[in-house]
Structures are given as C-alpha cells and as structure tokens.
Image (tube, helix red, strand yellow):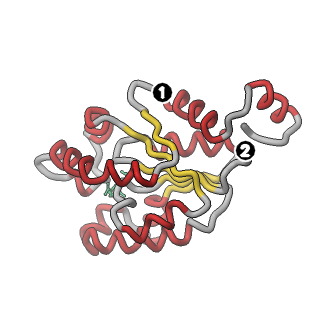
Amino acid sequence: MPLPKRVVLVGPMGAGKSTIGRMLAKELGYRFLDSDRIIEDRCGANIPWIFDVEGEEGFRQRETAMLDELSLEERTVLATGGGAVMKPENHSLLKKDAVVIYLKTSLEQQVERTRKDRNRPLLQNDDPVGVLTRLFKIRDPLYKKLADIVMHTDRKSPRLVVRQLVNKINPRTPRQRRQMRKEGRSHV
Ligand code: S3P
C-alpha cells in the first residue's frame, strides 16, 4: 500500500497532535506542519492576540485559508487546531489526498495536558473543564466522521502511538521495513 500524500491529525486540545505529528513526520520522512503555528508566524501575533483583536470568527477565517493552502502540500503531516472540524467547508480541505487520524483522548487527559496553558483562549475562563466537556460533545462526532483512523492515546507514550500509527498507515512486516530502510527506499 503506498503512503498517503498527506497525513492530517485532528482531535481536541491536549490530544498531543503537535508532539505526535512531529514524531510521525520524522518516522515517515515527511515534513511536519502545524497550522496554528503557521497562522501565528504569518500574523506575527499569537493565538490569544488574534482571538482578542479579531474574535474567534477572525481566527476561524484565517484557519480555513490556512487549511486550504496547506491542503496542497504533499508528503506532509499536518497538526490542526482542535476546532478545525467546526466549519463544514474545512472538511474537504482536511480530507484532500489525506489519511485523517483522530487522536482520541479522555477528558481527564485533556484537562491535565491543558491545565497550565495560557495560549488557548477558549480555556481562559472559570470553567475550562466545562468548556472541554461541551466541545467534546459537539466535536467528537465530527472527528469520528472525518477520520480514517481513530487512535486512542490515553496511557500510551507518544513513541508507542507513533509506532502504532505507522503500522496502520503502512502495514508492512518489520522485516520488509528493515530491508527498505537498508536500501534507503523508505523511512518507515
Ligand atoms: C482551538 C484549539 C487550538 C487553537 C485555538 C482554538 C479549539 O489548537 O486552534 O486555540 O477551538 O479547540 P490546539 O487544539 O492545538 O490546542
């Protein structure tokens, strides 16, 4: 089975999309892209600032434009923001030439991983757990609908998640993989 042109990671805040995406890209010999970080670089401002000045809708417009642009980038692993699935017009951009992976994470893990974060404006309020709970109810069905692979990440190291993902994306035998690596034909 040939490798997909693109791998796209979706899932909630705190799912580990950036960490796992970076490691997965290295493993596949692909380029790692993080849509939030590229939006910040282009704006010269961080996400809280964009939410502050342009509102969530301003950020979402930038996000859609970014997903459109990045949908043309082949041999890439793309980490998306947790809300990228909210606009229906983003769905075809996420799916384009891609294997979409949903990094599914329990609410407890999301809370734990985002607890001290100041860079996520949607969680800067009195009830971040309530927000994560509400967002999960709305978004989980959308992540599932878009995903070709659903990968549970709780109680797994990023390394293990990446190994399991590589096996799902490109299920060769370990012997085949060793041989290909030796021949420099593939990074997996
Ligand atoms: C958001 C998630 C964030 C970022 C923005 C909005 C969301 O990305 O795009 O703060 O709506 O869930 P991460 O999922 O990488 O935290």
* Whether the residue under disc 2 has CB within 8 Å of ligand 1: no
What residue appears at the point 62 percent right and 37 percent down from the top-left corner? 166
Label 1 crowd (10 A; few <14 / some 14-19 / many >=20): few
Give the answer, above or below, for where 122 lies relative to 115. below
Q: Residue at x 52, y 48 (%)?
A: 148
The N terminus, quarter of image:
top right
Nearer to the camera, 133 or 42 = 133
- In this rendering, the answer to whether 70 lies above or below 153 is below
Q: Secondary structure at mark 1?
A: loop
Question: Which corner quadrant of the figure contains ligand 1?
Answer: bottom left
- Residue occupying the point 54% across, 45% down: 21
Closer-to-camera residue (174/119): 174
The dot on residue 157 is 1
The amino acid type found where label 1 is placed reads Ser
Q: Position of residue 164 (x, y in %)?
A: 57, 31
Question: Quadrant location of the C terminus?
Answer: top right
For this view, does 117 lie left or right of residue 16? left
Q: Secondary structure at mark 2?
A: loop
- Mark 2 highlights which residue? 1
**Residue 107: quarter of image:** top left
Horizontal side, residue 183 vs residue 61: left or right: right
Inter-mark Cα distance, 2 to 1: 27 Å
